[in-house]
Amino acid sequence: MTSLAHLTVLGIETSCDETAAAVVRGIPPGPGEILSNVVLSQIEAHGPFGGVVPEIAARAHVERLDALITRALKEAGVSLHDVDAVAVTAGPGLIGGLIVGLTTAKALALAAGRKLIAVNHLEAHALTVRLTQGVSFPFLLLLISGGHCQLIGAAGVGQYHLYGTTIDDAIGEAFDKTAKLLGLPYPGGPEVEGLALRGDAKRCNLPRPMRGREGADFSFSGLKTSVRQLVRTTNIEAADIAAGFQAAVVEILVDRSRAAMAMFRADFPDVRMPDFAIAGGVASNAAIRASLSELAKTNAFSVKMPPPGLCTDNAAMVAWAGIERGQLGHFDSAGVSPKARWPLASADPRRNAGSAFAFDAPLDGGVAARQD
């Protein structure tokens, strides 16, 4: 290692249906310098199935990853021997894809004599606002994606207070299933958002599960069921249903985030103007971004959002998480294993890995929700 104060890291991401490689350089708390960031999506391969098929995803990672890493290094103008470490998503995610990425990273690190850093996918999302905007700890994070929906107080690398999580479906999954009910193509999030612009939300009487409840947990199953009933039993236009669904989601997110803001202030009373970070693929939704920005302003939080391209799954966030952990000397041996389930609360190896929550992806077979 040349230095723990200034690192250049190759990042690899294969947790779901994006195959990605990136090279990032920087010093925490950031911002970092993204030297390259290459992402290949598998949307066309999974589209006919309405979700991610784990076997297809793993096979695509095998076929594409080597070329993507070569391209990322070339675009960054570095060789493998120029990087300080190789960071790779080790979980949570689809186990087949994780094995592909982790095995590749181990081989590269061993061949080049570089350090290996196994990254928690959720922590990579959490730290993206430090990569892009140099946000200082502590900050409040809303992570909203195809596989996750959580409100987290980030006190430091590996130090996270879980304020709320979904008790059933993830928010991105609800968007995708609503899109399918409305006959929209996969992935459904952008399709529902576009259709909602042409609709009237007031025409739909949809529930806002968990709104006003104690705590900051989420629930989207009942909302999804109500959309299904509207589609099957009424003649309400699809655009109006899309608008009604999106309006309900926005209200739920605002209500739950407001509750988490109160919890965060109780935990960190000395922070005068806390940052409220919003990450994950669903964070690219314009209506959600606008409403949460207004909430932050009203509650004296400073909203921080990565650009949409860094909200979805990518390897730049993995490389940056590697920089954060590498500076602290948190490296991994070749014996590290992939984890289909890896709660963010156990991202710090010095802490007890037990948690009441598990953020899962299917272990085998079936169709999975998108992670981003």
Image (cartoon, helix red, strand yellow):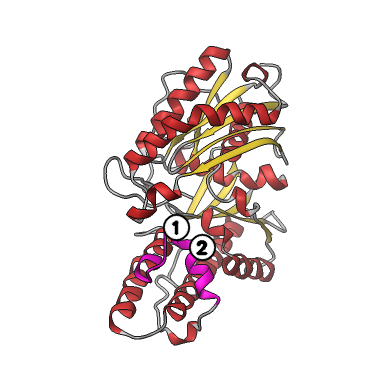
Q: Position of residue 128 (x, y in %)?
A: 62, 45
Is residue 135 at all visible to an observer of this figure?
no
Is residue 295 at all visible to an observer of this figure?
yes
Q: Residue at x 46, y 81 (%)?
A: 240
SS type, badge 1: loop
SS type, badge 2: helix
User: Of the numbered discs in the image, which one, if any, rests on residue 190?
Assistant: 2
Q: Residue at x 57, y 32 (%)?
A: 11
For label 2, count other residues whose C-alpha is less than 10 Å away and answer few (under 14), some (14-19) or many (20+): many
User: Of the numbered discs in the image, which one, if any, rests on residue 23?
Assistant: none
- Left/right of residue 182 with respect to residue 266 in the rendered view: left
Q: Residue at x 64, y 27 (%)?
A: 73
For label 1, count other residues whose C-alpha is less than 10 Å away and answer few (under 14), some (14-19) or many (20+): many
Closer to us: 282 or 163: 282
Q: Position of residue 153 (x, y in %)?
A: 56, 51
> Against 208, is 62 above or below?
above
Closer to us: 311 or 192: 192
Closer to us: 212 or 269: 212
Amino acid at circle 2: Pro
* Residue denoted by label 1: 187
* Quadrant (top left/top right/bottom left/bottom right) for the N terminus: top right
Separation of marks 1 and 2 at Cα, in angstroms: 7 Å
Amino acid at circle 1: Pro
Q: Position of residue 26 (x, y in %)?
A: 71, 33
- Left/right of residue 359 with respect to residue 290 in the rendered view: left
Q: Position of residue 306 (x, y in %)?
A: 65, 52
The question of residue 44 being in magenta is answered with no
- Asked if the residue under mark 2 is in contact with the one under mark 1, i.e. CB atoms within 8 Å, the reply is yes
Picture mark count:
2
| Range drawn in magenta | 179-197
